[in-house]
Image (spheres, grey):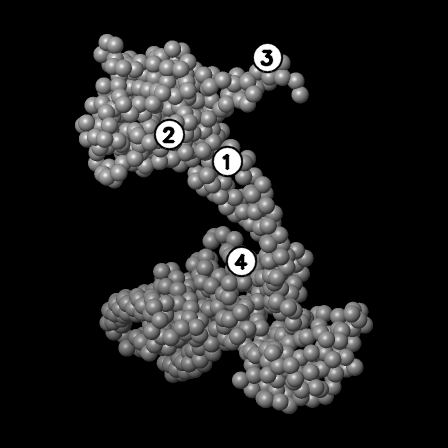
Amino acid sequence: MNFKKEYNQLIAPLIKNSPVIIILMVLALLATRRAITYMTPEYRAEGAIKINNQNQATFGIFSEDNGSSPNGGENFLTEVEVFRSKDLVKKALQQLDWELSVFRVGKLRLVELDEECPFTIEYADITAAQQNKLQYFDYLGNDRFRLRQGGETDSTGLEVALGEPVNQLGLHFTIHKNEAVLAQKPNCLNEGDRFAFKINSLDALADRYAGEKLFVKPVEKDISIVKIYFNHELPEKAQAFVNELMETYIREGEQSKKMQADSTLAFLDQQLAEVGAKLRSAEANLSGFRGGNQVINFDQETDATLKELTQLDLRRIDLDMKYAEMERLQTPLFTGKNLQEFSPNFEALQDPIFRETFFKAQGYEALRKDLLQQYTPTNPAVANVDEKIKESRTFLNETLITTMNNIRAKQDEVDQNLRKLNADIKRFPEKERNFVALEREVSLNENMYNHLMRKRTELAIVKASDLYPHKIIEHAERPKQVVSPNKSLLYGLSALFAMLLGMTFAYVRSFFKDRIKGKDDLDNLPVPMLGSVYQKLKKHDDGFALVSGLVASIDKLPDTALKHQGKLLVTTSMLPAEGKSFTATELAKAYAAVGKRVLVVDMDVRKPTLHLNFKVQNTIGYCDVLEGRVYALNAIQKTTEENLYILTAGRLESQNYALLFNRRSLDFIYDFRWHFDVVIVDTPPLGVFEDSLPIMSDSTANLFVIRAGFTKKRMLDKIANLTNDFHVPNLYIVLNGQAVSSKVPGYKRYMKKYYNIVR
């Protein structure tokens, strides 16, 4: 892993742009701080309640004497949904009496007042049009206020004294000072203060309090404890609502239990009256039979038959009562009656799946009722709930039909056994048979009466004692800490967002703006690096020192030239101003300085600059040779440098740039190699014009110049693609403008010391 490269790519852009990142983070924190001041703070109150999710509607009426205990947990999740229902929220709000809301009007938001409200408002006969509508008024001082009848923007309004009744536009109210609050906080009411009040409808309050600010969460599915959370800008209201919601749920549960118990007691009383009348009649008949026939006792066979008949009769009556309960339950299912208004005796079914489905159906109908307050019946959400209700009712109907068929089958079986025993009794003597029948009727009615009386007594005891109560295990306390807005979270998110934005800016800026600094930035290029052209130090640097390393590298390259033929070097670049002409000039001077016979050719005919570097005239040159106006050797000029000659660009009078690709344009340059030791050709930028491609195919070395501190890093991919597309042979990278300090640490300092440079 190249640590320096990774540092330059990942760390250096962040350090370079750290001021921008810091400024963005500071601005984000300041903006967040300002935004938080405009947000409405909210407090969260929480409470916990233990739910009695046992079904007590039947109180074991249809169970065996040693019946099983109630099955808990089947309808617990349904009860959790009850806390979210608008019906329960409405009933809680009715107890709280929060119909009136008073606000202090600020520049950006309304602040609700409750315990610290400096006013008390009495109202009556508020029309529906004025409900849920803010009424603005200003305190003018001297116990007077101005009602803004036209809304917040009304600057005139109606001036009224405190305590004076107002009857305007369906409003009938009177505003009084709250002396108790003003005595404690006299500065809470000042001249010019603006207030507003609103008379809330119960539906509007329920929509607000049953919304996203109310959160109900079961502790665990198997533990019947519910946690209730509620957010409100007033801590006292948050506390009061949570406590009242739990208490309302308990009251509703008690009322529901009482209604179910009363209904069951009425049923038992009716049955007791009927069975009691039958028992009295049977006892009278038996007593008369005994007296008239002087009957004392019969043998054991008669007693055994009597007991068996009695048990079968009790079984038949029990089945009849269960069947009657099934028919009672079937009525609301077939008629489409709301299941929330019906409480069945589930023990008659003894089917936990049926009970769970019934509770789900009740929950779906409650949910549908809530959805219809927001949507039309054709809304997809309502239609989905309707489909679930339909499926639940279908399952309940099928279960009832199956259960009733099973009961009828059992009734037929009991009737068959009764007929068999009655047939056996008919074989007894008539007197004995009549006695058995009378005694059987007495025993049957007596046992049934005792059974019903025992159940009625148990029901009365349970109704009075409340064996399975709902219980608040954690009352809500008044919250002291603000939960929304979460300042720490907002500050953290804003700082993180600003930092990410700053980092993105740093990397994007680095991608588009960062320039190549040294050799390490060129590692990913598919072209080898041949050498560097160093920056020129003032006062003491000669030109040869700048390209000496490059000259040495070029001389080490394999040369395909023929014997006595000179080197052909071509300089180009991706874009203008990267120093290709400067590199060609310095190389020419360096080779001439070591005694080489050097020719420099300027093929950049569109923007020639070499003649300026050597201070010669660009009267005739390369273009004149191409167009045949002069011989090639006659167009060469001598420079002031020894052994250094130049063929300037000249002027292409025909503007026919296709001549640059003519074979003739290359032939005379190749001929120059027989007359000079080194021929250096300066060509146009390869990324702009492709004039240099023909001559680059046969050169000793093609020098692609990249300028340090100028060429942008994002150009490296384009350079790589360009060189790969053209398949240029003998192509090498030359880094122009390499800092001399990169040779060794403290290079400049050592150079100054060497030359005795003293400041």
Instruction: Name the N-terminal-most of marks 2 and 3.
Output: 2
Q: Residue furthest bottom?
A: 167
At x 71%, y 74%, the residue is 193
Q: Which residue is mark 3?
A: 754
Observer able to see residue 105: yes
Q: Position of residue 647 (x, y in %)?
A: 32, 25
Distance from label 3 to label 1 (Cα)? Answer: 36 Å
The quadrant holding residue 422 is bottom left
Distance from label 2 to label 1 (Cα)? Answer: 46 Å
Mark 4, secondary structure of its residue: strand
Distance from label 2 to label 3 (Cα)? Answer: 40 Å
Which class describes the residues within 10 Å of circle 4: few (<14), some (14-19), or many (20+)?
A: many
Q: Position of residue 631 (x, y in %)?
A: 23, 25
Q: Which residue is mark 4?
A: 226
Give the number of the mark in front: 1 or 4: 1
Give the number of the mark in front: 3 or 4: 3
At x 48%, y 61%, the residue is 80
Instruction: Name the N-terminal-most of marks 3 and 4.
Output: 4
At x 52%, y 60%, the residue is 215
Q: Which residue is mark 2?
A: 617
Distance from label 1 to label 4 (Cα)? Answer: 53 Å
Observer able to see residue 449: no
Q: Are marks 2 and 3 in contact (CB under 8 Å)?
A: no
Instruction: Name the N-terminal-most of marks 4 and 2.
Output: 4
